[in-house]
Amino acid sequence: GESVGLHLPTLSVQEGDNSIINCAYSNSASDYFIWYKQESGKGPQFIIDIRSNMDKRQGQRVTVLLNKTVKHLSLQIAATQPGDSAVYFCAEKRNYGQNFVFGPGTRLSVLP
Amino acid sequence: DTEVTQTPKHLVMGMTNKKSLKCEQHMGHRAMYWYKQKAKKPPELMFVYSYEKLSINESVPSRFSPECPNSSLLNLHLHALQPEDSALYLCASSQASLPDTQYFGPGTRLTVL
């Protein structure tokens, strides 16, 4: 399940299940979005991106959905594996310069 | 080569010290970034360089001084830091002319005593 509180929101899923991580963004003028994975002690690693003229984009085992009406972004991971355990951040590029703003992050824990 | 390198990996400094963080990329990217990340928080943008010129300064205190000597290198000079400046400092790079993904380095873990 998913919990939100004083700590980083955490999503726990069984190995092999699909994961859905959600992100709300604030600026309707944002034109580019990225999902990053950050493992402990490492920098954020690019997973997938989507531009504002698209609703959906698929990669290897990952799909990003963009709903501009409600300013919502989601990352779907198929057949979640233990190596997927990490903190996932969405980032939006504001419609000026190169200003990327990160969401609060979600910790994904994969249960054996 | 999609690698951004950062040195040092770890840095411990006193409040009166002067130190520098270094970042390097060889992807031909013309935009480079410094972010600060506290534990359990997302990265926060500090500075953006575009074509070796400072384009964004997110109201960062002057005790942090960025420098971009050439298109491959980015430095962050530190002086008179406070304990609350302890954090992971991340460097990233991207294409400058189009909205494009940022590639991050592994970060420098800074502790200010």
Image (cartoon, helix red, strand yellow):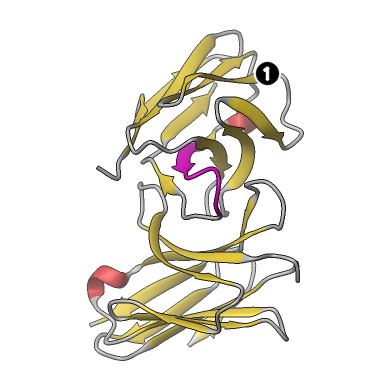
Of the 4 image quadrants, the one containing the C terminus of chain B is: top right
Q: Is residue B97 left or right of residue A77?
A: right
Is B91 covered by the magenta stretch? yes
Q: Is residue A106 above or below residue B14?
A: below
Residue bounds of the magenta highlight: B88-98
Q: Disc 1 is attached to a residue of which chain?
A: B
Nearer the observer, A76 or B82: A76
Is A84 covered by the magenta stretch? no
Please tell me which residue is depicted at 56% across the width and 40% down the height of the picture: B35
Q: Position of residue A79 (x, y in %)?
A: 26, 87
Q: Is residue B79 left or right of residue B106?
A: right
Q: Secondary structure at mark 1?
A: loop
Nearer the observer, A81 or B93: B93
Q: How many marks?
A: 1
Q: Is residue B42 left or right of residue B20?
A: right
> Is there any visible trace of residue A7 in the rendered image?
no
Please tell me which residue is depicted at 36% across the width and 53% down the height of the picture: A40
Please, what is the dominant secondary structure of the magenta stretch?
strand
Please tell me which residue is depicted at 52% across the width and 80% down the height of the picture: A74
Of the 4 image quadrants, the one containing the N terminus of chain B is: top left
Please tell me which residue is depicted at 69% across the width and 57% down the height of the picture: A94
Looking at the rendering, which quadrant does residue B65 occupy?
top right
> Is there any visible trace of residue A22 in the rendered image?
yes
Residue type pointed to by label 1: Arg
Q: Position of residue A51 (x, y in %)?
A: 55, 70
Callout 1 environment at 10 Å: few (<14), some (14 to 19), or many (20+)? few
Q: Which residue is mark 1?
A: B63
Q: Is residue B87 above or below residue B72?
A: below
Q: Position of residue A69 (x, y in %)?
A: 72, 86
